[in-house]
Image (spheres, grey):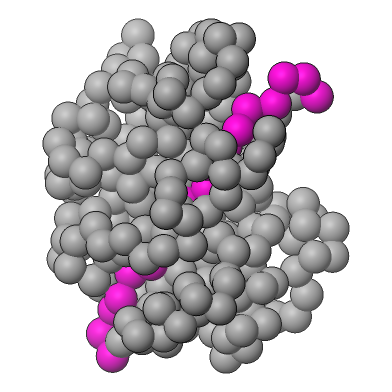
């Protein structure tokens, strides 16, 4: 499968989401069981904070044309790996912006097997970050991974990674992949937490985290994989996590 199939072109391009919020769609990567592997489209989020400081969430590749575009927005100050499987392009961004601070969710350094070198900061608490006040930080601890969610207060934008996946059937070539996405609970427009991942989060803690996110009343939800939600964010949260009430 070519890398672009399943992705959301144009790739490596800044796409405005709200004031001071952009996404960049990257290539689709194969991930999952030895066979068949799902094509996971990748998506980065960039938030501009006070002083034109840029918060870079789940980086995608950084070709020269994208680097020039990013530098028209400001300067990357914080490069964030929000869970243990979202780290691959962090070294590329750090090489381009060596003064940026790297923040890594638990287990990334072990998962990366030496790919990430140099200093990094832990991303595992709810407060104590340079972006406090502009972005709320919410770690959700599971047995397999901790995923850290973010809420940009000014634009009411919730930024998730794998907690909700929303694969569109049109981006899945194979009927088998479409069936697996449906069985896995991640087929749009009814995407949610993958069923296998649900089992790794303690339900009381996950329920409390979801209540916190609903309390933020997001207008939109950016997802790393699949179709994101440009509107009705709070309603989409309630729908995606209805299974928690079972």
Q: Residue 47, located in which quarter of the rendered image?
A: bottom left
Left or right of 212, for residue 243:
right
Residue at horizontal 60 percent and vertical 33 percent from the top: 39
Residue 77 as seen in the image, left or right of residue 142? left
Q: Nearer the viewer, residue 71 or 112?
A: 71
Residue 235 position (above or below residue 93): above
Residue 181: x and y in percent read: 52, 17
Q: Residue at x 54, y 63 (%)?
A: 59
Question: Horizontally, is 19 left or right of 138 in the view?
Answer: left
Q: Is residue 116 above or below residue 39?
A: below
Residue most toward the right?
A: 113
Quarter of the image where one finds residue 196? top right
Residue 88 appears in which quarter of the rendering?
Answer: bottom right
The quarter of the image holding the C terminus is top left
Q: Which residues are magenta?
A: 34-51
Q: Is 36 drawn above or below residue 8 in the view shown?
A: above
């Amino acid at each position: 499968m070519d890398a672009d199939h399943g992705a959301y072109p144009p790739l490596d391009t800044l796409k405005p989401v709200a004031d001071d919020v952009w996404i960049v769609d990257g290539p689709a990567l194969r991930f999952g069981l030895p066979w068949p592997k799902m094509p996971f489209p990748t998506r980065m989020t960039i938030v501009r904070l006070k002083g034109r400081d840029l918060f870079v969430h789940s980086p995608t590749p950084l070709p020269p044309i994208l680097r020039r575009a990013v530098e028209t927005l400001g300067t990357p100050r914080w490069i964030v790996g929000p869970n243990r499987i979202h780290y691959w392009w962090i070294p590329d961004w750090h090489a381009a912006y060596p003064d940026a601070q790297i923040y890594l969710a638990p287990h990334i350094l072990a998962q990366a097997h030496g790919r990430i070198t140099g200093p990094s900061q832990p991303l595992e608490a709810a407060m104590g970050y340079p972006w406090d006040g502009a972005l709320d930080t919410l770690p959700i601890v599971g047995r397999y991974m901790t995923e850290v969610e973010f809420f940009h207060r000014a634009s009411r934008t919730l930024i998730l990674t794998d907690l909700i996946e929303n694969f569109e059937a049109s981006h899945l070539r194979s009927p088998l992949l479409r069936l697996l996405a449906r069985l896995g609970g991640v087929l749009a427009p009814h995407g949610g937490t993958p069923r296998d991942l649900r089992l790794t989060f303690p339900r009381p803690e996950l329920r409390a985290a979801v209540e916190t996110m609903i309390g933020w009343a997001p207008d939109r939800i950016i997802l790393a994989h699949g179709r994101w939600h440009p509107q009705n964010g709070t309603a989409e949260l309630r729908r995606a996590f209805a299974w928690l009430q079972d």
